[in-house]
Amino acid sequence: MNILLPVAFVLCWSSGFIGAKLGAGSASALTILMWRFLPLTVVLAVVAVTVARASWQGLGVRDVVRQAVIGALSQSGYLLTVYYAIQLGVSTGTTALIDGVQPLVAGALAGPLLRSHVTARQWLGLCLGVVGVVVVTTADASAAAGVAGWAYALPFIGMLSLVAATFLESRSATRVAPSVSLTVHCAASTVVFTALAVGTGTAVPPAELAFWGAVGWLVVLSTFGGYGLYWLILRRSGVTAVNTLMFLMAPVTAVWGALMFGEPFGPRTLLGLALGLVAVVVVHRGAAPRGDGHAGDPARDPVARGRADAVAGAPR
């Protein structure tokens, strides 16, 4: 794998946590999410009608509804909890930690639910990755002041929502093109976020340039950059490689948050970063033979397909 691809992917995916922090200073989580998804959905709808019309052929109402539910779980449920947690003062590193645990939770459930195989050495690497992100984010959490304890449960709930979306998509019998799932997911999230924003009186965006800068940051870097690179790496290297890179999100976000917002960064954060890098090496070296060359191909691997389609547009 070209080293530039995983580096760009980690930065773009991590940028979502930073963008949420940037926007939190000028508007509520619902306002940011509504205006992040509303114009994006309009653009995707135009593309769906004019360019990607063929991708929608063969899909029934049931398929579209299923994708809408997946979008509500993987975007609305996940992003709202993460953004709200950051707004309440939970550090970006802590929210990135809980997101980083998602591959391990999905991997642990993939065996009994989807009969997916992960080698023992890869499990060792995944566990090392968990240790690394725990070290990083416990350091952040211990330094936090004035943050309600229940706020730390919010990103955990969001992570479980993303896991549920992953398995719901994995069990789908209909193959849906990424462009279609992205459009439906974003449209469903737009409806949810707009309804909540209007209902709570937070739909009107602030006139501050910082708000629109944060929205642009999230759309370009987090949605298009994060999801686009996710899909590209998934096709080239498989789901386990992507899951391993996820473990780098917490330490990278912690460093980024320290540089931009003055969030805590000390020896434990550095140790967690080192463990995350070791986890990447262990998992990649412990990868099972690709056999017929299609291991990790989303079209043939239900775990890869489910995770890829479930997070369509969800990159922070």
Image (cartoon, rainbow, N blue to C red):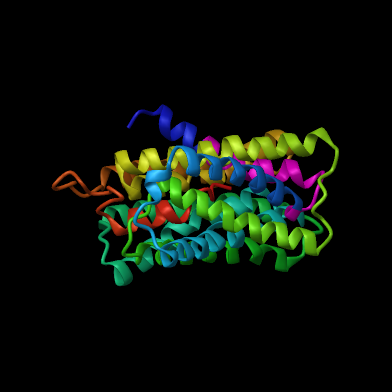
Position of residue 121 measured from the top left corner of the image (x, y, whole percent): 28, 53
| Image point (39%, 29%), residue name | 3
User: Is residue 133 visible to the viewer in this orientation of the structure?
Assistant: yes
Instruction: Specify the farthest residue to the bottom.
Output: 112
Q: Is residue 165 left or right of residue 291?
A: right
Along the viewing direction, whichever of 273 and 165 lies nearer the viewer: 165
| Region in magenta | 11-30
Quarter in which the N terminus is drawn: top left
Q: In the picture shown, does residue 233 fall above or below 154?
A: above
Along the viewing direction, whichever of 169 and 259 lies nearer the viewer: 169
Q: Is residue 19 magenta?
A: yes
Along the viewing direction, whichever of 114 and 72 lies nearer the viewer: 72
Position of residue 230 measured from the top left corner of the image (x, y, whole percent): 43, 42
Position of residue 135 measured from the top left corner of the image (x, y, whole percent): 55, 52
Total numbered labels: 0
User: Is residue 270 visible to the viewer in this orientation of the structure?
Assistant: no
The quarter of the picture where residue 168 lies is bottom left
Q: Is residue 280 left or right of residue 82?
A: left
Q: In the picture shown, does residue 182 fall above or below 277?
A: below
The quarter of the picture where residue 103 lies is bottom left
- What secondary structure prevails in the magenta region? helix
Q: Is residue 131 magenta?
A: no
| Image point (43%, 67%), residue name | 62
| Image point (25%, 60%), residue name | 117
